[in-house]
Image: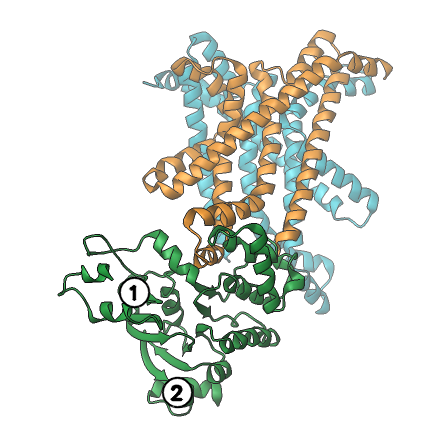
Amino acid sequence: MEFWTRTIVANTGPLLEGLRLTLLVSTIAFLVAAATGLVICLLRIYAPPLRLMLSAYIAFCRNTPIFVQLLWVAYAWYDIFAWPKDVFTAAWVALALQSSGYLAETFRAGFESVPHGHVEAAYALGMGRFGALRRIVAPQMLLTMAPALMNQFIVIVKCSTLVSVIAVPDLMFQAIRLTNIWGEPVPILTFVAVVFVILIISLSAASKKLTDRLRARMAT
Amino acid sequence: MLGLSLFWEYRAILFQGMLINLLIFALSSTVGLTVGLVACVGRLSPFTLLRTASAGYIEIGRSIPEFVLLIWVNNVMPVALSAIVGERIRFNPILSATIALGAVASGYFAETFRAGIQAVPRGHVEAARALGMRTPQILRRIVLPQAIRVMLPELMSQNIGLLKTTTLVSVIAVPDIMYQVGIIGQQEMKPLPLYTGTAIAFFLVIFALTTLVDRPASQLQRS
Amino acid sequence: MSVMAAVHPSERAESDVVSNAEPSLAIRVVGLNKSFGDVPVLRGISFDLSRGQVLSIIGASGSGKSTLLRCLNYLERPTSGDVWIAGYPLTFATDRNGSRRNPTAARIARVRAEVGMVFQQFNLWPHMTVAQNVMEALIQVRKLPTKEARSRAEYYLAKVNMLDAAERYPSRLSGGQQQRVAIARALSMEPQIMLFDEATSSLDPELTAEVLAVMRLLAKDGMTMVVVTHEMAFAREVSDRVMFLHGGLIEEDGLPSVVFTNPRSERCKQFLSKFLG
C-alpha cells in the first residue's frame, strides 16, 4: 500500500501534465464542435438547399464510432490532405467531428423550443428580426441548451481518453506509459481510473445543479 | 479516387473482424442487461445499504470512460485476483472486453430500467391495489407493460451505442475489425482506403440500425 | 402629400386620398382578404375606426377574428387589401416613382411600435424579470436610456397594479398577473392603438376580472382599442362598437345595444343566444 502511494506521488508531474492535456484537448474540441454545430444549425434554417448535405453530415458524425473517426482523421486524412500534421490536432478534430453532429441537433432543439409567441410579442412591440433573435431567442436557447451542452462536454472528456492510442500524451497515455516503465499496473491505473471517475462525477454534479437552477427559473 | 478496392479486397478478413465486434456486443449486452436489472432492483429497494450501494455502482458505471475501464480490467483485475487467489490469473482479452463494456453498459441500462418503472403513474398502481390486486400481479399486468413501452426505445438506442464502443477492443489485442484494419494498414502502407472504408461501413450499419429503431420507437410512443 | 399626388390617377383609389386627409381615423381597412393556402379566412373586410373608440370583435372560432386582429399589426400578412394605421399605410409603401411596393421591415416595425398587442398566451419572456420585460422594447425600439425606461416601466406597472412584482420572474406569477404585466409592457410603448387577442381566454374565471378591470380603465382613459373576445358582458358594457364575424365576413356591425338585443343576422342571433341565454 505504501509502495503504491509512493509510486503515485513520485509520478505526480507527468500525471498532472496528462490531466492538463486531457482537459485542453476536450475544451478545444468542445468549443470547435459548438461553433460548428451552431453554424450548421443556422445554415439549416437560412440556407434550405444545403439541408440534405448537412443532414448527411450530422448523420455521419453521430453514427460513426468515435474510435473509427479518430483513426480515420489521424491516419487517412493525412494521406489525402497532408493535414492534420500532428496528433494533438488530429485528436481535437476527431472529437469535434463526433460532437458537432450532436450539437447541431442540440442547437436545433434549442431554437425550436422557444415558443413562437415570444418572438411574436417582440415583433408586435416593434423589434426587428435581429433584435428579437439577439435579445429573446438566443438567451432562451442558451438556457434551454445549457444542460445538453454540459452533457456533451462530459461525453467529450470521456471520449478523449482514446487519444492516447494515437500517442497524444493525455492522462491515459501517461498512465499506460508509466505502467510500462514501472511494471506496476495496479497503483497507477487504479489511481487514474479513480481520478477520471471523480472528474466525471464532479462535472455531472455541476451540470445537474445548473439544470435544476435553470428549471426553477424558467418553469411555467 | 478513394481506392476502396483495397477495402473490398480484404473484405473476408474484415468481415471476420466485424463478427468479433458483434460477438463482444452480444456478450457485453447480455451482461449489461442482467447486471443492470439487478442494479436497478437494488436501487429501488427499501433497504438503505443495498440502495446506496446500487446507486454508487450505477453512478460509477456511468461516469467511468469505457477505455479506462477496459485497460483497468485487462491489466489490473487479473493481478488483483491473482493476489487474492494465489494463482497466476490472466484474462482472455474478450473476457476483459465483456466485463468492461458490460459494466459500463449496465450502469446506463439500470437507469433506463428505473426511468421506465418510475414512468408508470403512481395512480395506476394505487388503482390496481384498490381493486385488490397483489404486487406480483400489479408488476406483471400494470407496471411492466407500460414500463417496457417507455424503456424499449432508449434501450435500443443504448445498445446501438454499445455496438459503437466495441470498436475499442482492438487496443487490448482483440482481433476485431479495427485490429485487422490496423494490421492490413501496416502491411499495405495505405491507411486511407481502409479507414475510410471502415468508417463508411460502420456508418451504414449503425445508420440502418438507428433508422430501424426509430420507427417502431415513435410508434410505441404514440400509442 | 406629394407622394400621394405622384400616384397615377387611374390607380389612385378613393381611399388613398381620403385616408391621408383623415387624421382622426385610427384604423382604416379596405378590402382585406387573407387565405392560408387555399383556405380563405377573411373575405373582403372593410371598416374604419375612429380614435378613442373601443371596437369588440365577436364570433365563433374559425370566423377569422384573430386573423383580422393580427393583420392590423402585420403579424399576418394580408393576401390582398390594405390597412392604414393612423393614416399611415401598413400594407404597402410607395417608392419614389409613385408605384406600390411591399412594405419594408423597418416600416412594419415602426407601425408596430404604435400598435400595442396583448396575446392570449401572455408571451412574457421567461428569462427576464417583470421589469425587464416591460423595459426591453423601450430600450431596443424606443431607444430610451435605461433610467428613463425603468421609470416608465414602473409607472405602467403601477398602473396595472403589478409594481411590487417588478423583480420577479414571470414563472412565479399567476395567469392574471402575467397578463397584466403583458398589458403594461404593451402600454409602456405608449401606442396609439391597443389590440387584445382573446386576452382573457387562457385565464381561470377568477383571474379574468382583474384583467378586464384594467381593460375597462384603458377604455375610460380614451385608448383606441380593438378587442377580440368571448366576454360578452365586457363587449356590451365597454365597447362603443361591436362587430360579429362569420366565415371571414362582417355579418353585423354597430352599437352594442343594437347588436346584442336586435341583430339582423340570424347566425349572430344564434351565436349570442348561447352566451346570453
Res B81 quadrant in image: top right
Q: Earlier in the sequence, mark 2 or mark 1?
A: 1
Q: Are the two marked residues, 2 and 1, in contact with CB atoms closer than 8 angstroms?
A: no
The amino acid type, in three-letter code, at marker 2 is Val
Q: Residue, x 63% and y 69% (percent of image)?
A: C161
**Is the residue A22 above or below the residue A131 in the image?**
above
Q: Chain of mark 2?
A: C
Q: Residue, x 67% and y 30% (percent of image)?
A: B64
Residue A155's tag is none
For marks 2 and 1, give the CA distance.
28 Å
The amino acid type, in three-letter code, at marker 1 is Ser
Q: Is C171 positioned to the left or the right of C114 in the image?
A: right
- State the residue in front, B44 or A9: A9
Looking at the rendered structure, the number of numbered marks drawn on it comes to 2
Tell me the residue that label 1 is attached to.
Answer: C35
Residue extending farthest to the left is C10
Tell me the residue that label 2 is attached to.
Answer: C259
Q: Residue, x 57% and y 50% (percent of image)?
A: C146
> Does dot 2 land on a helix, a strand or a loop?
helix
Which colour is chain A painted?
orange
Res A13 quadrant in image: top right
Q: Chain of mark 1?
A: C
